[in-house]
Amino acid sequence: MPENHATSDPVTTYSYLGPAGTFTEAALKQVPEAAGKTWRSVNNVGEALADVVAERSIAAMIAIENSIDGGVSATQDALANVPGLRILGEYLVPVNFVLVARPGVRLEDVRVVNAHAVAYAQTRLWLERTLPDHGHLPATSNVAAAAALLPPADGDEVVGVLADAAIAPPGITEHYPLEVLAEGVGDNPNAVTRFVLVGRTSAVPPATGSDKTSIIAELPDDRAGGLLDMLEQFATRGINMSLLQSRPIGDALGRYRFVIDLDGHILDERVADALLGLKRFSPRVIFLGSYPRADKQPVTVTPRYDNAAFVEARDWLRGLVTGEPQSFTLG
């Protein structure tokens, strides 16, 4: 997609962790609305979200969780601290990697490896087994790790002189003159990274029956049973959590916020009721959005937790207040 930061229209611009060829770009390719629009390459999650807040972009694609290393802490912290954001959708990208180097470098020559932190976590066992004495040089993205191996345009020196090789996505040699030293270097062939498309706060979309709700909540104090009290808001309403991860708030030791993904939509009676209970309990609740699940799997609940059960219970209570006659079923 063309990128022209000076003239791009914010209404049709999407930010993503670049440069071209990253897994984040692969996730953005799954968004039908982004096809044919301007894609703005950025260096990190903070810059991507800043584009959205400053209205330089209509939305940003960012990684939020992977199946090997769990939640992406930089994304979770940014979503907790940048106001006015809403998750619009989630997208899954299968992840595998290759080890690349400059022409002439052999596998046995590799001592230092460029790799993005998430990619390194997903290939660490292979690297330790194959290159037990290697060092890790962090990179801002998987593609940047590979690009840093090459000399600059003037050819005076090698930018990535401290690294001998890089962990990169398959197909990287189509973009850069590098050689593949090893394929399939991921520790888990079934590894998947979950991405979310984040825009500015807007009305939630209708429930589809296959939805997820993301929130961030803080405990009111540091005491025994505090986390259990929070989790009971969901358990007593039959809500499954597909993600529960703690992150330090940063103002004192022992102070944490919790990043939570719930199965269901805020318009589902059980989810709405749980969020009301959570709001009464937690000093700070951030609603990140309700959106369709990437796997399209329907959310199922037992009858006592479905919408009809909550509506029936509310009608029963209203009848008690207004003095309506109660019906009884004789056994």
Image: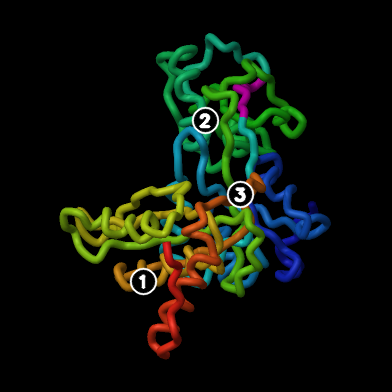
Between residue 114 and residue 294, name the one nearer to us.
294
Q: Residue 102: which quarter of the image?
A: top right
Is residue 24 depicted above or below 280 in this figure? above
Q: Residue furthest right?
A: 36
Give neighbour class at mark 2: few <14, some 14-19, many 20+ (Cα, 10 Å).
many
Place of residue 34 in the rendered image (x, y in percent of width and height, measured from the top left): 76, 57
Q: Identify the residue position indicated by label 1 in the image.
A: 279
127 with respect to 32 (left or right): left
Between residue 120 and residue 221, name the one nearer to us.
221
Q: Residue 226: which quarter of the image?
A: bottom left
Q: Identify the residue position indicated by label 3 in the image.
A: 17
Please tell me whether mark 3 or mark 2 is closer to you in this view: 3
94 with respect to 86 (left or right): right
Q: Residue at x 37, y 54 (%)?
A: 235
Quarter of the image that includes the C terminus:
bottom left
Place of residue 274 in the rendered image (x, y in percent of width and height, measured from the top left): 41, 65
Alpha carbon distance from label 3 to label 2: 17 Å
Q: Identify the residue position indicated by label 2 in the image.
A: 114
Q: Residue at x 63, y 43 (%)?
A: 92
Q: Amino acid at mark 1?
A: Lys
**Circle number at residue 25:** none
Please tell me whether mark 2 or mark 1 is closer to you in this view: 1
Q: Is residue 18 visible?
A: no
Give the secondary structure at mark 1: helix
The range drawn in magenta is: 96-102
Q: Is residue 180 magenta?
A: no
Q: Residue furthest bottom?
A: 322
Q: Amino acid at mark 3?
A: Leu
Q: Is residue 98 magenta?
A: yes
